[in-house]
């Protein structure tokens, strides 16, 4: 986790946005919707923004027709547009942290929260609809091994992007929403020493 610098706020003030990063199946959309409701903020899902930009074409279709690099370009464009806003809970795609420029954008736009989930939980949450997620579908037969491999690559990137980390493995979404809100509010109300964990 990287608590300093920046989360789009002056010390003691609320951040402009709360941004959820994390692996596929970590609960970003479900938790994000609940958190937005709790705070009275807008919920934005960047995958939905990407789909809106291509007349609703599904993401697996984009991957198949244009390839991953083109998808990542669309993702960066969507993140730029969304990060201009405020009072939003933003759920990002699991690969949003792959580009350093995205991470920079997100950290400037608000408080970045990494939602974690154990690999077996990810498999349980995503295994029945692997076709919806091209990055999982490309792994072949052993989903757990593929998830472990991707998590190994991405874990350090989520970690470096995050101001806060919240595990979603064994609790229902409302409890996770409460925990994020509590930690976020505590973080922006209590001035910290440089380097002190949130
Ligand atoms: C991706 C995650 C997906 C979506 C795309 C790529 C990834 O979003 O952006 O399929 O690279 O991890 P979710 O994390 O919401 O499933």
Image (spheres, helix red, strand yellow):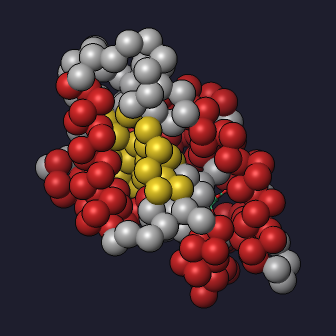
Q: Nearer the viewer, residue 95 or 72?
A: 95
How far from the left and from the top, in percent, is residue 14? Answer: 22, 28
Q: Is residue 139 above or below residue 181?
A: below
Q: From the viewer's perspective, tell me whether residue 89 is left or right of residue 162.
A: left
How far from the left and from the top, in percent, is residue 171? Answer: 38, 69
How far from the left and from the top, in percent, is residue 96? Answer: 60, 45
Residue displayed at 54% across by 27% down: 2
Q: From the viewer's perspective, tell me whether residue 194 is left or right of residue 66.
A: left
Asked whether the viewer can see residue 48, the reply is no
Q: Is residue 17 above or below residue 5?
A: below
Residue displayed at 40% across by 62% down: 29
> Quadrant of residue 137 in the image?
bottom right
Q: Nearer the viewer, residue 42 or 10?
A: 10
Q: Which quadrant of the rendered structure holds the C terminus?
A: top left
- Across the whole image, how many numbered discs are drawn on residues? 0
Q: Nearer the viewer, residue 163 or 38?
A: 163
Residue displayed at 49% across by 67% down: 169
How far from the left and from the top, in percent, is residue 4? Answer: 48, 19
Q: From the viewer's perspective, tell me whether residue 42 is left or right of residue 98.
A: left
Q: From the viewer's perspective, tell me whether residue 155 is left or right of residue 36.
A: right
Residue displayed at 29% across by 38% down: 184
Asked whether the viewer can see residue 1, the reply is yes
Q: Is residue 104 above or below residue 195?
A: below
Q: Which quadrant of the rendered structure holds the N terminus?
A: top right
Location of ligand 1 given as a quarter of the image: bottom right
């Amino acid at each position: 986790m990287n608590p300093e610098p920046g989360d789009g706020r002056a010390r003691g003030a609320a951040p402009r946005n709360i941004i959820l990063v994390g692996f596929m199946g970590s609960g970003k959309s479900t938790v994000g919707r609940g958190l937005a409701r709790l705070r009275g903020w807008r919920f934005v899902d960047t995958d939905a923004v990407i789909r809106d930009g291509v007349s609703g074409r599904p993401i697996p279709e984009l991957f198949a027709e244009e390839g991953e690099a083109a998808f990542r370009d669309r993702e960066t464009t969507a993140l730029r547009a969304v990060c201009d806003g405020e009072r939003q809970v933003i759920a990002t795609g699991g690969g949003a942290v792959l580009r350093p420029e995205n991470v920079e954008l997100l950290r400037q736009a608000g408080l970045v929260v990494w939602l974690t989930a154990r690999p077996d939980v990810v498999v349980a949450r995503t295994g029945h609809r692997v076709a919806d997620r091209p990055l999982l579908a490309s792994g072949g037969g052993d989903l757990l091994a593929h998830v472990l491999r991707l998590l190994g690559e991405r874990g350090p990137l989520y970690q470096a992007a995050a101001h806060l980390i919240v595990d979603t493995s064994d609790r229902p979404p409302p409890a996770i929403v409460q925990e994020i809100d509590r930690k976020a509010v505590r973080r922006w109300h209590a001035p910290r020493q440089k380097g002190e964990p949130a």
